[in-house]
Image: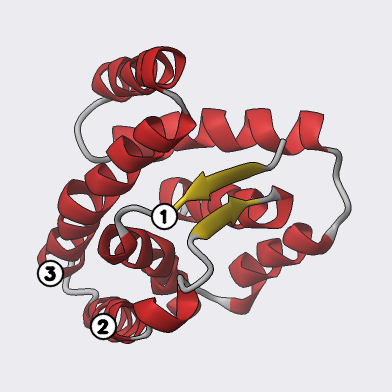
Amino acid sequence: MRFHVPITRPFFLNVAASHGFVDVHRPPQQLALYALAFVPLPGYVVTPAFFLLSVVHFAADTSFVMSVLFHAYLAYVMWRRGLRDAFDVVITYLGSFHVPLLIARCIIASRWHELVTLMYCVTVSVMLSSVVTRHGTFVLGHRMQMLVVIHSILQERF
């Protein structure tokens, strides 16, 4: 399933979209997982994996129960208000809570290379936000969903 969402919060979208670059400092055998993003998997495989791994990935911020409750809230917002509002909630969460916690985890674990890469990529992404988001719609397609799945696996597993 592909999601076409009007961009209403480009700053948070760019922060969220660029935070996965912390993975570039991983060993090559782990980064090889990113090749899966180019495998033409059907949407009925990719989208459920995307949602399930999102629950697992956000659990690192608080707890598994809180992540399940947050995702239930997102489903409620989508049902009552639509995809755009649910997307705004999750993007705001990513930009204002998830990424700052990732920064804190990098500092606590002395993962300075990851921290510098993250800060650089977020800064460049935010600076380029007017170029990247000029069309006004963000498409969360299967390849982007697979990138999120792989990032979530690497952050959880290794």
The residue most toward the front is 135
Q: Earlier in the sequence, mark 2 or mark 3?
A: 3
Q: Nearer the viewer, residue 1 or 107?
A: 1
Whether residue 56 is visible, yes or no, is no
Relative to residue 17, is residue 117 depicted above or below?
below
Structural crowding at the residue carrying mark 1, measured as other residues with C-alpha within 10 Å and reported as few (<14), some (14–19) or many (≥20): some
Whether residue 97 is visible, yes or no, is yes
Percent across and percent down for residue 103 are 18, 65
Structural crowding at the residue carrying mark 3, measured as other residues with C-alpha within 10 Å and reported as few (<14), some (14–19) or many (≥20): few
For the residues marked 1 and 3, what is the alpha-carbon distance in whole angstroms?
A: 31 Å
Relative to residue 81, is residue 56 depicted above or below?
below
Q: Circle 3 is placed at which residue position?
A: 107
Secondary element at image label 2: helix
For the residues marked 1 and 2, what is the alpha-carbon distance in whole angstroms?
A: 19 Å
Label 1 is placed on what type of residue? Ile
Secondary element at image label 1: loop
In the rendering, which numbered label is found on residue 123?
A: 2
1 and 3 marks in contact (CB < 8 Å): no
Q: Nearer the viewer, residue 146 or 73?
A: 73
